[in-house]
Amino acid sequence: MQQSRDESVEVLVMGSGAAGLTAALAARKAGAEVMILERTGKLGGTTAMSGGIVWVPNNDHMGEVGSTDTRDNALAYLRSLAHGASNDALIETYVDTAPDAIRFLEAETLLRFHALRMPDYHYEFPGGSFGRSLIADLICGGDLGELRAKLRQSPNFPIPITPLDVDRRGAIASFTGDGADGGFLASDEMMSRIENDMLGCGAGLVAGLLKACVEAGVVLRTECRARGLLLEGHAVIGAEVEQNTKLRHVRATRGVIIASGGFERNAQLVRDFVGGPLQGAIGSPGCEGDGLVMAMQAGAALSNMAEAWWVPVLRIPGEEYEGSEFRRPTTIERSMPGAIIVNRKGRRFVNEAHNYNDVTHAFHVFDPVAFDYSNLPAWIVMHQGRLDRHAFLTRFPGDPVPNWLTAAPTLRELAAKIGIDPDGLSETVERFNAHARNGVDPDFGRGASRHDTYTGDTSLHGAFATLGPLNQAPFYAMRIYPGAIGTKGGPKTNSRAEILDHAGVVIPGLYAAGNAMASFNGMAYPGAGGTIGPAITFGYIAGRAAAGGNI
Amino acid sequence: MFAASRAQDCAFVRDMDNWAPFLTGYQQHTKLDEQESEWHLKGELGGLTRIAQFKVKILSWNEPDDVTFELAGINEPVTGTGEFAVSMARVESNDLTKPITPAPGKMRRLADRFWRMLVDRIFNAQRKIAPAQAVDPRASETTLRFSVTVTARGMSGPILNVLIAPMLKPVAEDLANKIAAAISALQTRAA
């Protein structure tokens, strides 16, 4: 490897997702010269592939949907999810700073946020609320100029939709095509958006951040990978950077911010740290733990390493994203009436409609006697009525039934085809159907929470939004896996996003934000946008702290 | 336009094994019978590549002038028709695709550029090694045209049609050019 000329900046940011871009913008606005390094050829990280929702308690927009919040309420809610694994000091930092971070973005970027009616993932817990999930308006991709081609594309949201389209129509049912106009958005509006290159979801959020960074004078380097930190004693003074097979030193006189995402794409690190089978990473291909490894080399203390932002995922055979097998995250696939999830005994094991993070914990249940995972492998099982009424992955009602669904005329035959216990499946469906007809699920409480019904068919009343019998042949099955949006362990930080060593002492010049930092939330996922909200907030904190501004 | 007789062109096209790998995103094909075949093609959207499966049925075979066919998606609500046409030499444009839904404006232009770039990236190497078009004095010059129309239906149809339309023209052009180059190469070897 050749060595090329060294460079110097004031603040060096690794990663170009929401955390990195917000950190860069905050540092730049605080007066620092800033450079962003992105190891892939595309900008936006996992954020650009996401729905782009930002969970911000006590935000300024909650009144738009008739909700209110207080600091105490937000703290009570987050503490109710802690299980002793959360970092209470950082919870307070988050609740106190997140609304300011959004105000900062609204002041310094084109981004304009709106509150969604979407309830918290544990709305019924102490302090639970709605309106904490924010989404930005659509952004015109053409405004990015030459950078437009470098914006990471989302395989999950390839067309310009926004969660606001769905939320304003009364939740997700409209997304399935049940709306009066046959869909969640009028065709002419969609055509207009495509023609004008409008961007929604995570791509829109990244576009807004990116444009602001460029206009502020932040230097962007793609296909430029940090390989190690430059240390001077205990302090970090820059990074060794690889670009075009050449290595050089980039000195950072005010600080290095690690915002390079999680390590879910690094099989070795996953095996070393993550606390359960992770069978499908859906984040950016660059999330291989570069930042984690560098922080460890600098002596950082680690925390929350076993946890991830979990999500059950499905795989359509043959689908790939940038050369890697692609897995699709699930929501309505699990929550619409007429579908259940079973294990190899043909038994349900979870409230299928519950939030994706917490549902996935049930996939990791371990039987100590059998010394095996009780609920792996697992399958979604559904009936024809489910497919007739609602979308399932890329298949819409009326479309041909794809051959990636296993089909059979009876439940017993379906069980035989996928290799699970036919008696168990038959008994499970019989019991589920009997209760579903009455709108109850005494086994797992499906339909009892506001979240369950929000993600179900809201044209149906109460728990029937998610509960319905499987009674119309043929029946279908598809294997479902415990996947992750990203990992949530990493270097420990303080309330200034400074990375701490094993003695709890700050490593001078080293900061972290986003999925690269140890999440303060332990195993919890408080609501939609629970990853990007902290990413933006601690990016904002890290950028200002590194630049030397007031926090 | 290239040097070969219409009969030679038809003989080449008749056996899909000859030209199937030239199709953009080609993965595999299976002949089900004399009329029907099943095709697996890899396409890309939003950075996601996916293998689309189609059934193709020959509708008419008017040797040596043309062959017409229809296609239907196995997993997607997509239908279409197409034609290989061989005619005596005359300079013609290969711009014979018929996108169903025009997508005017900036996005259309961007998408068009994107797909051209993609096709170039995938097939440029083969183009470079395509043999020069030698002229067999025994053969007359002919023009091979390939046209295809694809329509997505169902709830997602209107959106998919906007996205599909820019893909068709470069795919059709590319296939026709590669077949022409292959037939020319055969002519050269035969000579």
Image: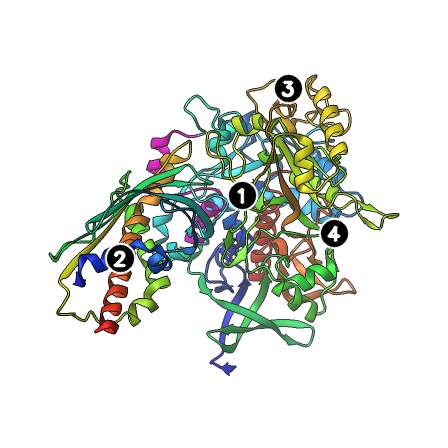
Q: State whether residue A438 is above or below residue A183.
A: above
Disc 3 from disc 2: Cα separation: 65 Å
Q: Mark 3 highlights which residue? A: A462
- Tell me what residue is drawn at x 53 percent, y 33 percent: A115
Q: Are marks 2 and 4 in contact (CB under 8 Å)?
A: no
Instruction: Tell me the SS state at disc 2.
Output: helix
| Camera-side mark, 3 or 2 | 2
Disc 2 from disc 4: Cα separation: 58 Å
Instruction: Tell me the SS state at disc 4.
Output: loop
Label 4 in the same subunit as label 1? yes
Q: Mark 1 highlights which residue? A: A102
Q: Quadrant of the N terminus of chain B?
A: bottom left
Q: Which residues are magenta?
A: A185-211
* Amino acid beneath label 2: Ala
- Tell me what residue is drawn at x 73 percent, y 20 percent: A435
- Counting from the top left corner in percent of width and height, residue A474 is at 59, 29
Q: Say whether residue A299 is left or right of residue A546.
A: right
- Depth check: give the residue in front, A404 or B189: B189
Disc 2 from disc 1: Cα separation: 67 Å
- Counting from the top left corner in percent of width and height, residue A34 is at 49, 63
* Amino acid beneath label 4: Gly
Query: Quick one: label 3 or label 4, which is nearer the N terminus?
Result: 4
Q: Mark 2 highlights which residue? A: B11
Q: Is residue A193 magenta?
A: yes
